[in-house]
Image (cartoon, coloured by chain):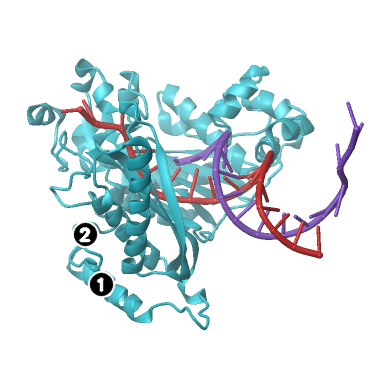
Chain colours: A cyan, B purple, C red
Amino acid sequence: MVRRPSEVEPPRFGLIDGNTFYVSCERVFDARLRGKPTVVLGNGDGCCIALSPEAKALGLKIGVPIFQVPKDIRTQVQVRSANFALYGDLSARIVSILHDLFPRVEVYSIDENFVDVAGMKDPVGAALEARERILKWIGIPCCAGLGATRTLAKAGNKLAKDQSKRAVNAGALSVFHATPHKLDALAVEDVWGVGRRYAARLNAEGVTTAAELAALPADHVRARYGVVLARTHMELRGVPCGDLELEEPDRKQLVVSRTFGRDVVDPMEALATFATVACEKLRKRGLAAGALWVWLDGNPFKGDSFHASRAAPFPIPTQDTAEVLRAVRFLAMSIMRQTGKSRGVQAYKRGGVGLTDLVGAEDRQADLFFRPNEKAERGMAVLDKINAKFGRGTLGVGTVGWRVGGAMAGERRMGSKDAQWRPTLQALSPSYTTKWGDLLAVR
DNA sequence: TCTGGGGTCCTAGGACCC
DNA sequence: TCTGGGGTCCTAGGACCC
């Protein structure tokens, strides 16, 4: 049963997130973007991954390739390439502000943080104070949701956003305490845990709002939609199914993949670059990979849609880039032979490298026949140090017959300038001073 | 016409998240 | 011309075992 208002519990969780976060980050450093329709593009200047409200008002949608946007609209829009290093930095500052105000903080994503408000006298006041500080000290506008569960806090956050969009004084209405009986205004597809598929099925049985979802019988939800949605359903009713997750759980896999700037006949250098980056991330986290998988995709936009992958275990989990590169080459050759033979495929549009079965590097057990290659791994540690000191990409691993240049993790663009596979940024200069007007001239 | 049953491990696919 | 990237969890089904 949905609880009555008199039984409503005080909020236990808050969710604080930055409004159109990537756009807001860009605006911190470039005041000219403020108030103007602004778009942040993903890899290769492909799709819109963040839109300011003004850009949304022009009809732009998340995920739409920018080249598909009509020219007369495009010329009205300020465009930036994603700069994740910058966003990550601002995100960390937000987290430190939250730590000053709340006893526990869960970093949920680059722009969202759950906080513990259980037992607080004035949780709304605390959320408003957080919003104020983040806006003043960092320059990012935020909204906050409060609720007895994390799902309700998420719901409150969304409702706060809707509310502050309509308000003249956005700040005053930027916090919303969501309770099980205050969910009528929330569309069911905006519930955390309800994606497109579930939303379509729920709509088909007449459920269009979060309130209607909460009102469904629990056993019906469990039987028809499974345990995942059943938990969401309980949380909407105010029954917590999870607490804050303060420790970052150990990674199970680590993936580096890209859409290539154009179709590529020989993807080996690209895959080697991805593997090099993946191994750096691996060592940074103190992990070792028990297995590897490699995949290559055709170009679905040219009617050549295929996906081919190969996987292989390592005898002992490894951190050694050279060992991973050897395996990558072996697997990639195998894929290319197969696709070449069975389909006559000559070109690939996308590829990736995944390291899986990750374990702590210190937890590996050597046996009689196999042990980690300590010499090679010490070499890797030296390489990482040099790259950290003298700039990423200073040193690479050349032992497998190709050279990987400018590939290091965290770099905004992977690959050497003349690499065929390198995601194109021809439409944009990476500088803050870039304007869409320049962009048309470059074309 | 006529089925063993139960446990475990692995994988592929589907669903979700930002 | 140009079409994002990186994760997790759950479930169903197959292989294998006793």
- Total number of numbered labels? 2
Neighbour class for label 1 at 10 Å: few (<14), some, many (≥20)? some
| Image height of A438 relative to A15, above or below | above
Mark nearer the N terminus (1 vs 2): 1
What residue is drawn where x is 42% and y is 69%?
A318
Q: Is residue A88 left or right of residue A383?
A: right
| Image height of A55 relative to A362, above or below | above
What residue is drawn where x is 65% and y is 33%?
A179
Neighbour class for label 2 at 10 Å: few (<14), some, many (≥20)? many
Q: Nearer the viewer, residue A308 or A22?
A: A308
Q: Nearer the viewer, residue A341 or A402?
A: A341
Q: Is residue A137 left or right of residue A230?
A: left
Q: Are marks 1 and 2 on the same chain?
A: yes
Is residue A15 at least partly visible in the picture? yes
Q: Position of residue A365 (x, y in %)?
A: 53, 77
The residues tagged by marks 1 and 2 sit, at their Cα atoms, a distance apart of 13 Å
Q: Amino acid at mark 2?
A: Val
Q: Amino acid at mark 1?
A: Leu
Furthest residue to the left?
A: A441
Q: Chain of mark 1?
A: A
Q: Position of residue A230 (x, y in %)?
A: 70, 37
Question: Of helix, strand and loop, which one carries label 2?
Answer: loop
Question: Of helix, strand and loop, which one carries label 1?
Answer: helix
As drawn, the label of residue A404 is 2
Q: Position of residue A86 (x, y in %)?
A: 28, 49
As drawn, the label of residue A383 is 1
Q: Is residue A111 left or right of residue A226?
A: left
